[in-house]
Image: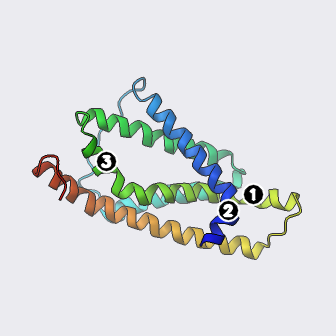
Amino acid sequence: MKELLKRNKRILYIASFLYIVGLILGVTFYNILPSLSQHSAEDITVFGYFTHNFSANLFLIFSMFTFGILTSILLLLNGFLVGLSSLQSLTDHGNDLLYILTALVPHGIFEVPAMILSGALGFKLLDFVYMKIRGIHFSKKQFFKEFLYFVLFIFLLTLLAAVTEAIITPYLLNKLALGGSHVY
Protein backbone atom coordinates (compact mmCIF):
# COMPACT_ATOMS: atom_id res chain seq x y z
CA MET A 1 0.00 0.00 0.00
CA LYS A 2 2.79 2.39 0.91
CA GLU A 3 4.50 1.81 -2.45
CA LEU A 4 1.20 2.30 -4.29
CA LEU A 5 0.65 5.63 -2.57
CA LYS A 6 4.24 6.67 -3.27
CA ARG A 7 3.90 5.87 -6.99
CA ASN A 8 0.69 7.91 -7.15
CA LYS A 9 1.65 10.79 -4.87
CA ARG A 10 1.56 13.38 -7.65
CA ILE A 11 -2.11 12.72 -8.47
CA LEU A 12 -3.00 12.33 -4.78
CA TYR A 13 -1.46 15.73 -4.02
CA ILE A 14 -3.30 17.37 -6.92
CA ALA A 15 -6.64 15.84 -5.91
CA SER A 16 -6.14 16.79 -2.25
CA PHE A 17 -5.12 20.34 -3.17
CA LEU A 18 -8.18 20.89 -5.36
CA TYR A 19 -10.53 19.46 -2.74
CA ILE A 20 -9.02 21.67 -0.01
CA VAL A 21 -9.20 24.77 -2.24
CA GLY A 22 -12.89 24.00 -2.84
CA LEU A 23 -13.41 23.49 0.90
CA ILE A 24 -11.79 26.85 1.68
CA LEU A 25 -13.90 28.58 -0.98
CA GLY A 26 -17.05 27.01 0.48
CA VAL A 27 -16.18 28.20 3.96
CA THR A 28 -15.26 31.65 2.64
CA PHE A 29 -18.41 32.22 0.60
CA TYR A 30 -21.02 30.42 2.70
CA ASN A 31 -22.63 33.66 3.94
CA ILE A 32 -23.13 35.25 0.51
CA LEU A 33 -24.86 32.29 -1.08
CA PRO A 34 -28.47 31.29 -0.44
CA SER A 35 -29.06 28.72 2.28
CA LEU A 36 -28.90 25.11 1.17
CA SER A 37 -32.24 23.36 1.08
CA GLN A 38 -32.84 21.33 4.18
CA HIS A 39 -33.84 17.74 3.66
CA SER A 40 -34.29 15.04 6.22
CA ALA A 41 -31.74 12.26 6.25
CA GLU A 42 -33.69 10.16 8.74
CA ASP A 43 -35.06 7.70 6.18
CA ILE A 44 -31.86 7.17 4.21
CA THR A 45 -30.47 3.67 4.51
CA VAL A 46 -26.94 2.31 4.32
CA PHE A 47 -27.72 1.29 0.75
CA GLY A 48 -29.03 4.78 -0.05
CA TYR A 49 -25.93 6.52 1.28
CA PHE A 50 -23.67 3.97 -0.38
CA THR A 51 -25.25 4.18 -3.83
CA HIS A 52 -25.31 7.99 -3.75
CA ASN A 53 -21.69 8.35 -2.67
CA PHE A 54 -20.27 5.49 -4.73
CA SER A 55 -22.06 6.80 -7.84
CA ALA A 56 -20.46 10.21 -7.23
CA ASN A 57 -17.07 8.53 -6.78
CA LEU A 58 -17.47 6.50 -9.97
CA PHE A 59 -18.44 9.63 -11.88
CA LEU A 60 -15.31 11.32 -10.56
CA ILE A 61 -13.16 8.31 -11.46
CA PHE A 62 -14.48 8.08 -15.01
CA SER A 63 -14.00 11.80 -15.53
CA MET A 64 -10.43 10.68 -16.26
CA PHE A 65 -11.42 10.62 -19.92
CA THR A 66 -11.55 14.43 -19.84
CA PHE A 67 -7.83 14.40 -18.93
CA GLY A 68 -8.33 16.15 -15.61
CA ILE A 69 -10.65 18.98 -16.66
CA LEU A 70 -13.92 17.59 -15.30
CA THR A 71 -12.02 15.94 -12.42
CA SER A 72 -10.69 19.34 -11.31
CA ILE A 73 -14.13 20.94 -11.49
CA LEU A 74 -15.79 18.09 -9.57
CA LEU A 75 -13.15 18.09 -6.80
CA LEU A 76 -13.44 21.85 -6.37
CA LEU A 77 -17.23 21.61 -6.36
CA ASN A 78 -17.34 18.75 -3.84
CA GLY A 79 -14.91 20.51 -1.52
CA PHE A 80 -16.90 23.73 -1.92
CA LEU A 81 -20.18 22.01 -1.03
CA VAL A 82 -18.66 20.35 2.05
CA GLY A 83 -17.26 23.68 3.27
CA LEU A 84 -20.51 25.49 2.52
CA SER A 85 -22.76 22.89 4.13
CA SER A 86 -20.50 22.57 7.19
CA LEU A 87 -20.75 26.25 8.03
CA GLN A 88 -24.43 26.36 7.09
CA SER A 89 -25.05 23.45 9.47
CA LEU A 90 -23.09 25.23 12.18
CA THR A 91 -25.29 28.32 11.92
CA ASP A 92 -28.45 26.21 11.63
CA HIS A 93 -27.58 24.42 14.89
CA GLY A 94 -26.81 27.49 16.97
CA ASN A 95 -23.04 27.30 16.55
CA ASP A 96 -22.95 23.95 18.36
CA LEU A 97 -19.55 22.80 17.17
CA LEU A 98 -19.80 19.47 19.01
CA TYR A 99 -23.04 18.68 17.18
CA ILE A 100 -21.51 19.49 13.78
CA LEU A 101 -18.36 17.49 14.50
CA THR A 102 -20.46 14.55 15.67
CA ALA A 103 -22.58 14.77 12.53
CA LEU A 104 -19.71 15.07 10.05
CA VAL A 105 -16.47 13.56 11.35
CA PRO A 106 -17.44 9.90 11.94
CA HIS A 107 -18.44 9.24 8.33
CA GLY A 108 -16.23 11.99 6.89
CA ILE A 109 -13.07 10.14 7.90
CA PHE A 110 -14.04 7.52 5.32
CA GLU A 111 -15.98 9.58 2.79
CA VAL A 112 -13.46 12.38 2.20
CA PRO A 113 -10.49 10.06 1.54
CA ALA A 114 -12.71 8.03 -0.83
CA MET A 115 -13.55 11.24 -2.69
CA ILE A 116 -9.90 12.30 -2.88
CA LEU A 117 -8.81 8.85 -4.05
CA SER A 118 -11.56 8.95 -6.69
CA GLY A 119 -10.26 12.33 -7.80
CA ALA A 120 -6.73 10.96 -7.95
CA LEU A 121 -7.99 8.18 -10.23
CA GLY A 122 -9.63 10.89 -12.32
CA PHE A 123 -6.10 12.15 -13.01
CA LYS A 124 -4.57 8.68 -13.51
CA LEU A 125 -4.97 8.57 -17.31
CA LEU A 126 -3.46 12.05 -17.65
CA ASP A 127 -0.61 10.96 -15.38
CA PHE A 128 -0.10 7.81 -17.47
CA VAL A 129 0.20 9.92 -20.64
CA TYR A 130 2.52 12.37 -18.85
CA MET A 131 4.82 9.53 -17.78
CA LYS A 132 4.86 8.08 -21.31
CA ILE A 133 5.81 11.50 -22.74
CA ARG A 134 8.61 11.81 -20.18
CA GLY A 135 9.85 8.34 -21.12
CA ILE A 136 9.02 6.76 -17.79
CA HIS A 137 8.00 3.13 -18.31
CA PHE A 138 4.67 2.24 -16.77
CA SER A 139 2.92 -0.81 -18.17
CA LYS A 140 -0.76 -0.91 -18.99
CA LYS A 141 -1.00 -3.98 -16.78
CA GLN A 142 0.38 -2.00 -13.82
CA PHE A 143 -2.00 0.87 -14.66
CA PHE A 144 -5.05 -1.42 -14.54
CA LYS A 145 -3.80 -3.26 -11.46
CA GLU A 146 -3.41 -0.01 -9.53
CA PHE A 147 -6.71 1.26 -10.91
CA LEU A 148 -8.59 -1.81 -9.67
CA TYR A 149 -6.84 -1.69 -6.30
CA PHE A 150 -7.86 1.93 -5.82
CA VAL A 151 -11.46 1.21 -6.87
CA LEU A 152 -11.68 -1.64 -4.37
CA PHE A 153 -10.29 0.58 -1.62
CA ILE A 154 -12.73 3.37 -2.57
CA PHE A 155 -15.57 0.83 -2.50
CA LEU A 156 -14.61 -0.24 1.04
CA LEU A 157 -14.18 3.34 2.29
CA THR A 158 -17.54 4.32 0.80
CA LEU A 159 -19.23 1.31 2.40
CA LEU A 160 -17.72 2.16 5.80
CA ALA A 161 -18.86 5.77 5.37
CA ALA A 162 -22.41 4.66 4.52
CA VAL A 163 -22.66 2.32 7.51
CA THR A 164 -21.31 5.05 9.76
CA GLU A 165 -23.57 7.76 8.32
CA ALA A 166 -26.75 5.65 8.43
CA ILE A 167 -26.25 3.84 11.75
CA ILE A 168 -23.49 5.24 13.95
CA THR A 169 -23.91 8.98 13.35
CA PRO A 170 -27.67 9.01 14.16
CA TYR A 171 -26.95 7.00 17.31
CA LEU A 172 -24.27 9.48 18.40
CA LEU A 173 -26.47 12.48 17.60
CA ASN A 174 -29.33 10.94 19.57
CA LYS A 175 -27.03 10.37 22.56
CA LEU A 176 -25.80 13.94 22.22
CA ALA A 177 -29.37 15.30 22.14
CA LEU A 178 -30.41 13.22 25.16
CA GLY A 179 -27.31 13.84 27.21
CA GLY A 180 -26.66 17.49 26.60
CA SER A 181 -23.12 18.21 25.41
CA HIS A 182 -21.62 14.79 26.03
CA VAL A 183 -21.34 11.85 23.66
CA TYR A 184 -20.97 8.56 25.49
Mark 1 closeness class: few <14, some 14–19, many ≥20 residues within 10 Å: some
Ranked by sequence position, the earlier of labels 1 and 2 is: 2
Q: Residue at x 80, y 70 (%)?
A: 138
Q: Which of the two residues, 114 or 54, is positioned nearer the viewer here?
A: 114
Mark 2 closeness class: few <14, some 14–19, many ≥20 residues within 10 Å: some
Query: For residue 111, which quarter of the picture?
Result: bottom left
User: Which label belongs to residue 127?
Assistant: 1
| Residue 31 drawn at (x, y percent) | 39, 25
> Which residue type does callout 2 highlight?
Asn
Ranked by sequence position, the earlier of labels 3 and 2 is: 2
Q: Which of the two residues, 95 or 22, is positioned nearer the viewer here?
A: 95
The C terminus lies in which quarter of the figure?
bottom left
Query: For residue 30, which quarter of the picture?
Result: top left
Residue hosting label 3: 101
Ranked by sequence position, the earlier of labels 1 and 3 is: 3
The N terminus lies in which quarter of the figure?
bottom right
Mark 1 vs 2: CB contact within 8 A: yes
| Residue 132 drawn at (x, y percent) | 85, 62
Q: Is residue 29 above or below residue 143?
A: above
User: Which label belongs to residue 8?
Assistant: 2
Between circles 1 and 3, the one closer to the viewer is 3
Q: Residue at x 66, y 59 (%)?
A: 9
What is the C-alpha distance between the residues marked 3 and 2?
30 Å
Q: Is residue 135 above or below residue 31?
A: below
Asked if residue 57 lies left or right of residue 169, the reply is: right
| Residue 177 drawn at (x, y percent) | 14, 48
Q: How many marks?
A: 3
Q: Which of the two residues, 142 or 54, is positioned nearer the viewer here?
A: 142
Question: What element does badge 2 sit on?
Answer: loop
Looking at this view, name the residue that lies furthest to the top: 32
